[in-house]
Image (tube, rainbow, N blue to C red):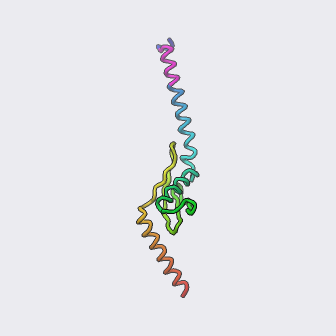
Amino acid sequence: MHGGRSTLEEEFVMTWIDRMAALAALALAGCGTMFASHPPEATDAVVRQASFDLACPAEQLQVVPINFRSYGASGCGRHASYTAACGLVGCAALVNGSPAENAQLQAEREEAQRVAQQHMAH
């Protein structure tokens, strides 16, 4: 016994400390992509989700970063904005607003562009 602890207790404590250190190292290893600005895995998640939401093949989509976690996706005459987040088990993307809201915003933008072009032509 050392300081009131048995050898078995010391082994248990050291094993527990070793396991916690290994777990912390694994968690921190995933932080490289978790906190990276626009990791490729996040873009892939946006492409998968946008392909479904916009009913557009992935090959026809363009995805551009907007800010830290936001992306814009466009293709097949439609577009939407997404927020992507990555963690230890992968990345996920969520559309900002509903597809119906995004379609309405797109229709309003297109109308504004059409009106602006008509004014410029006169």
* Residue at the spot 49% in from the left edge and 22% down from the top edge: 13
Total numbered labels placed on residues in the image: 0
* Residue at the spot 48% in from the left edge and 17% down from the top edge: 9
* Residue at the spot 49% in from the left edge and 74% down from the top edge: 110
Which quadrant: the C terminus?
Answer: bottom right
* Residue at the spot 56% in from the left edge and 35% down from the top edge: 25
Q: Main secondary structure of the magenta part?
A: helix
Q: Position of residue 68 (x, y in %)?
A: 53, 55
Up/down of 86 relative to 70, above or below:
above
Residue with the most extreme top position: 1
Q: Position of residue 53 (x, y in %)?
A: 46, 60
Query: Is 78 a magenta residue?
Result: no
Q: Position of residue 28 (x, y in %)?
A: 55, 39
Query: Is 13 a magenta residue?
Result: yes
Drawn side of residue 99 relative to residue 47, left or right:
left
Residue with the most extreme bottom position: 122
- The residue nearer to you, when weighing 49 against 118, is 49
Up/down of 65 relative to 78, above or below:
above
Q: Position of residue 11 (x, y in %)?
A: 52, 19
Up/down of 18 relative to 120, above or below:
above
- Quadrant in the picture for residue 107: bottom left
Up/down of 19 relative to 44, above or below:
above
Write down the region rendered in magenta.
Answer: 5-15
